[in-house]
Amino acid sequence: MDGAKTVAVLGTRGFPGVQGGVESHCQHLYPLMTQYRFRVYRRKPFLTEHSTGAYDNIDFIDWRTTRIQGVEAAWHTLRATLHCMIHRPDMVHVHNMGPAMLALPLRTLGIPIVMTYHSVNYEHKKWGKLARWLLRLSERLSLRYCDRIIFVNRLRMSLFVDEFPGKCVYLPNGVDPVEPTTATDYLDKHGIHPRHYVLAVGRITPEKGLEHLVTAATRSSRIEQVVIAGECDNDDHYLQQLKALDIKHKLVFTGYASGDDLNQLYSHARLLALPSLSEGFPMVLLEAMAHRLPIVASDIDATRQVPLPDECYCTPGDAHDLQRAIDRQLACDFAPVEYDLTAFDWPTIAQRTQQVFDSLLSNGQ
């Protein structure tokens, strides 16, 4: 690694062992890009007992920060930006539009900036009017001042490619090959019955539309259990709302799951439900496909990035249509589904990301 170019990473809470799509994206991508040395700024309150481990080409800088929604990300990004201005990396890789608001001061120092555009943050219900306005402003600033914009969603990129020619690159999220497990100790611990549960994976936040899944389960005689693997972002108000809707007592909350525990959940699920109202490119969809699970997903741009049959989709925010789609799947005997995932290979995505970085540095930008 001697002489390797340094890339500072902003906009992630950290990895490994931290919940979130951006976090999983970084954890898969950077260890494969061995020609670069990455400096990742992590937020201590979100690190877990699984956040240890060394990577040959990654250095972690861990700082304390508040967990106040909207404040923790802004404060951490400001501090990391100031650190970059003093300890200048060869390049900065920013994840999503909020942290990219500070691209201008880095740009004035001649530091090349790449932003990966994951999701449309200002569509999330958790943000108030001021926060949404700031996120929209951040989007415009990042698109203008970042040297390259990597979009994980091809449809989202199409909105900007004409306005910012030469900047926009489509690189989707990826998925690793998986080996399903026969172990069930994690399921036994939570009282989960193999092949008799609908699985949902991700943060427990309103944009995930989980209340519609709970309502669908309450109305359906075919849905025996709903297992939700994830944690709340900052408070448990939405979690309590979901529990109040669970009048048939079908819900099982496992908390954040990863590694072997998550593999067990995927390996023994009857199907994956993704009732989200807003997503960038949900990696859980790829993970479920790698496990050959049947899928029911909201019909939004993000879920149309993968090759799913039309019968897998339901109307976003419509519990009745979600129930109908799930019941139709459950009416059939379980059968593994073969999906074409050749376009979502992490080594290939890492190689193409490295080419984006190389092109900026070789041009002296």
Image (cartoon, grey):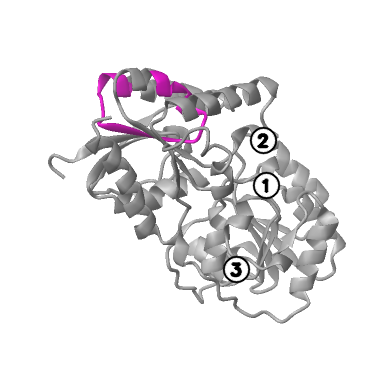
Up-down: is 109 above or below 237? above
Relative horizontal placement of residue 135, taking residue 193 as reference (left or right): left
Q: Which callout, 2 or 1, points at the residue further toward the start of the chain?
A: 2
Q: Is residue 351 left or right of residue 191?
A: left
**x and y percentages locating residue 162 in the rendered image:** 52, 37
The x and y percentages for residue 233 are: 59, 38
Between discs 3 and 2, the one toward the N terminus? 2
- Find residue 239 and report its image quarter: top right
Instruction: Quote the CA–CA distance across marks 3 and 2.
Output: 37 Å
The span from disc 1 to disc 3 (Cα, nearest Å) is 26 Å
Q: Does the magenta portion include 86?
A: yes
Q: CA distance from mark 2 to mark 1?
A: 12 Å
Is residue 195 depicted above or below 227 in this figure? Answer: below
Which residue in the structure is indicated by mark 2? 123
Magenta extent: 83-104
Closest to the observer: 347 or 301? 301
| Three-letter amino acid code of the residue under disc 2 | Glu
Instruction: Name the disc covering residue 188, or none.
Output: 3
The residue at which mark 1 appears reads as 208
